[in-house]
Amino acid sequence: MSEIGKLALFLGFLCSCYAVGAFAVGLRTGMAGPLRSGRRAVWIVCGLTVLATIILVRALVARDFSYRYVAEHTSLDLPKMYAFSSLWAGQEGSLLLWLLILSAYGAVFLWAYRKRLDPFYDAVAMVVASVMVFFTSLLSFVSPPFRILATPPPDGNGLNPLLQDPGMMIHPPILYTGYVGFIIPFAFGIAVLIMNRSGTRWIEEVRRWTLFNWMFLGFGVLLGARWAYIELGWGGYWGWDPVENASLMPWLVGTAFLHSVMIEQRRGMLKTWNVVLIVLTFELSIFGTFLTRSGVLTSVHSFAESNIGPWFMAFILGSSTIATALILYRKALLESENRMDAVVSREGSFLFNNVLFVALAFATFLGTTFPILSEAVTGSKISVSAPFFNRVNVPIALVLLMLTGIGPVLSWKRATASVMKRNFIIPIFVGIVATLACLPFGLHGIYPIICVFGAAFVMSTVVMEFARGVQARKDIEPPATPAALLHLVQKNKRRYGGYIVHVGVVMIFVGVLGSSVFQKEAHAPLQPGQSMAIGPYALTLQKVEEKQILNATQTRAEVQVSRDGKRLTDMYPAKAMYTKSQQPMTEVALHQTAAEDLYLILGGVNEDGSASIQAYINPLVGFVWMGGIVMVIGTIICLADRMRLRREEKLLVSEEKLLAS
Amino acid sequence: MNRTSLRLILVTLAVIASVAWLISSGVKQTGMQYMTVTELAQLTAPPHQGGFRLDGKVQTGTVNYDQRVPRLNFRMTDGKESIGVVYDGLMPDAFADGREVVVEGVYRHTDRTLHASKLVTKCPSKYEAEGLGKDRS
């Protein structure tokens, strides 16, 4: 079986090389034959990758320890579902997952555009196939997943307990769906340059693909944060760890692109800038994969150092050089059709949004790679961590929060003073009232105050936009009914979907503010029967017991929780000792409400029988997760707007038919 | 160039300048110098900088964990020299004798220890290739 897997990957490599060649010949000569053959080759790579993945997954689930990968990442006592998800526990399997998702994107792309005769789409497929060449060659020659052991061990090494979590089963595939998906916008951008295409048709298509990937990436980042919150057991969810940063950077640049692309659609400006952003987003996705897998930086993920680093660096350098050369070569194509009319305008605010998003990504990049950069420049290795990012990124993020309220309300071209007054007086007033209302609850410090003001300000601009929308339709149906609101959103999905995304963003800001500034912490060793207090809660240790579960021994404390004297619930913070690896693993106990989370950790059991309990109150942290869900809902609403696309699609298909006849 | 373009460029430059200032002051105030255990252990005078970042291994038999506080005391080694580390916080799950750790914190020359504010334990290499022998040729 392993031979078939190996062969499948090697054939996949040959086929992707062939596809690139066939597309190149077809595009050069204008012959339809090679193009058709190239498309078929991409389909075949997809099939071969699926085959290779099935073989590896089968071996993992069957615990066939003759496979090195299986012996490294699973064991006999591992539950079946985690044996399945150990596909992405190591480097080789992760790369295979990358290729699988990449070829799936290739297939979906070919399927979606199967009726288009335009060779432009073959150029897009050629770029996708070139990236396939890279990943199939990595899997065939550098980091092969199908290595067979000379003497298979009786049992495997087992899966890292941190990865034995349902959240960890879905987090990597979702994150990768976002990461890898940026290949399509990138391929579109490169294809436009290769084919010297003008016009804005492709822009709408790219916008939709980007929106889709962006949603998955953002959701994946939040799932990662949620996993860290539940599994890593330090009371927080975001530590500015290199791997977290790696997933955040392409998201930030992608967000910038999603905004500036609107200016291109509307006014035909910022074309070069948009191509640069697409390229950058894709390169950062590759860089993210590289950071996660290469071990150049230490992080909570801290994978072993590996041999793929130079390959990734070469790929990033090569592809960005080609992209830059193409952008310079096609300078005329990217000429702006319009000029900016005024600083205070929709365009102006989006431009600052872009500068700030890129600055945020740049600061994150700099901070993440600072040890490497400082050593290269000054010779002394300096590292920065969470305090740096909080100092630099928080103010930038707060300005962006303000822009979230200001930008969408400003009119295109030039915003007049009277309209601005009408639109902003109430939100400013609401912002001030909200800030004053929060002061008695211990709100202090300049950033938290700006954050509360900004959140209230943005929320009221959004509410006002909705109100104005239903008011404008009052002749069609009575405003202030749920139906009117629903129809308003249906009529203009892009616009109101965008506002809903912004509501999600505000919720995340509120959640981050609450859980970072107002977090409470307490620690005490408790004998059974003893209590400790944190905020309004009293925690009483009932007993400590040992239990055997699946593949671990669990030490579990039973803690009775009461709030303001009233009995609330029982919580069970625990520590599991994994039998196979003899590694302890903290199992956090969580009591979640909309207002706050009570978060308990069992530090350990002392010689005298007392248990060390570490407790946190994380106010409003639920808003972070709910905000993420609201953002996803908003994005889906935006994606549901197919009107513009359909109109252009019809036009295209009829045009192509005309050309063909 | 018209006035709007000029204004746009000026505002953009102002934004870039403020971000650059944020970054450079951030590095100055929060940057931590990488050191080897040997370099730190052989210091004869108190260092100028505040923060340090150290890579090394937990010296076997030196771990002293008082989980009532909680406070973790251990010595870190790079194979040649060793240095004391104090960390106020819960012991990370993967922390154990001989494990590779990264600590960040302030070095105090008076008691020759690093007072760590951050302690990261690298995953034991057990989960990567180890002891599986050669591939079948």
Image: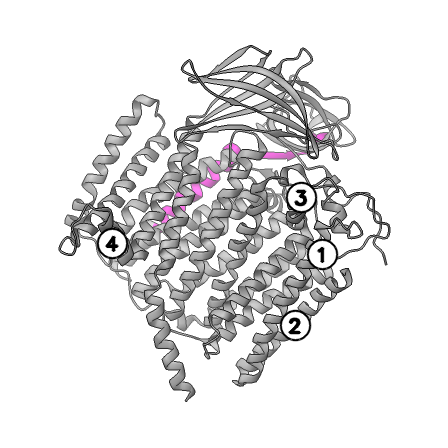
Residue type for callout 3? Phe
User: Circle 2 — which element?
Assistant: helix
* Residue denoted by label 4: A488
Q: Amino acid at mark 4?
A: Leu
Viewer-nearest of discs 4 and 1: 4
Chain at tag 2: A
- Numbered tag placed on residue A15 in the rendering: 2
The residue marked by circle 4 belongs to what chain? A
CA–CA distance between discs 4 and 3? 49 Å
Q: Earlier in the sequence, mark 1 or mark 3?
A: 1
Q: Earlier in the sequence, mark 2 or mark 1?
A: 2
Q: Which mark is residue A383?
A: none
Q: In terms of sequence position, does the residue under pointer 4 or pointer 3 come before the other?
A: 3
Q: Which residues are magenta?
A: B12-39
Residue drawn 63% across the image and 68% down it: A45
Q: Please rate how many residues cluster around mark 1, counting C-alpha atoms within 10 Å: few if below 14, some from 14 to 19, many from 20.
A: many
The chain letter under disc 3 is A
Whole-percent x, y for residue A310 in the image: 67, 56
Q: CA distance from mark 2 to mark 1?
A: 19 Å
Residue A304 x, y percent position in the rendering:
70, 44
